[in-house]
Amino acid sequence: MKKSQIIGIIFIAVCLGVLVNALSDPGKMAGFREAFADPEHTYRVSGLLDKEHEVIYDPITNTSLTEFHMKDQKGVLKKVKLKKSKPQGFEMSESLVIIGHAEGDIFVAEEMLMKCPSKYNEENHIIQEAGIPVE
């Protein structure tokens, strides 16, 4: 092999490595305190939808904005602006993972993952209400 071919192969390998690394790191897992202490980086925050506050989604004004409040796993409550339309079944979700960064006193999320209730959990709940023990 020629020197230029070897250098070309090494260059392509380095570029692929950088690309894979950039695409595979959607942010560090943290709570709101850590995310707001370092607003320049992307974080993944896990928590629960705070149902005491209203979920605001107005598709007439902006189809790509959903606003809600979320408590992280340590109980810190923050307002979240999700740059996506409101997912179906959002209010019924068991837990959320939002990916984004802090801006002022608001967490701006680019992506969100939801854990929806399992139909099996719902069936167990109905059975327990009927007084039948569940293993």
Image (cartoon, rainbow, N blue to C red):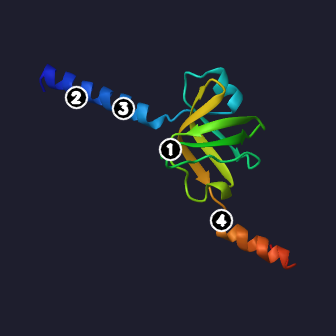
Where residue 83 sits: x, y (%)?
A: 51, 40
Mark closer to the observer (1, 3):
1
Secondary structure at badge 4 equals loop
User: Circle 2: is it few (<14), some (14-19), or many (20+) Cα within 10 Å?
Assistant: few
> Measuring 59% from the left and 41% from the top, which residue is drawn there?
98
Mark closer to the observer (4, 1):
1
Please give the residue where the numbered disc 4 appears in the rendered image: 118
Secondary structure at badge 2 equals helix
User: Circle 3: is it few (<14), some (14-19), or many (20+) Cα within 10 Å?
Assistant: few
Please give the residue where the numbered disc 1 appears in the rendered image: 61
State the CA–CA distance, disc 2 to disc 3: 15 Å
Where residue 7 sits: x, y (%)?
A: 21, 22
State the CA–CA distance, disc 4 to disc 1: 33 Å
15 with respect to 56 (left or right): left
Quadrant holding the C terminus: bottom right
User: Circle 4: is it few (<14), some (14-19), or many (20+) Cα within 10 Å?
Assistant: few
Q: Which mark is residue 9?
A: 2
Q: Which mark is residue 19?
A: 3
18 with respect to 47 (left or right): left
Q: Amino acid at mark 3?
A: Leu
- In contact (CB < 8 Å): disc 2 and disc 4: no
Mark before the other along the chain sequence, 2 or 3: 2
State the CA–CA distance, disc 2 to disc 1: 50 Å
Q: Amino acid at mark 1?
A: Thr
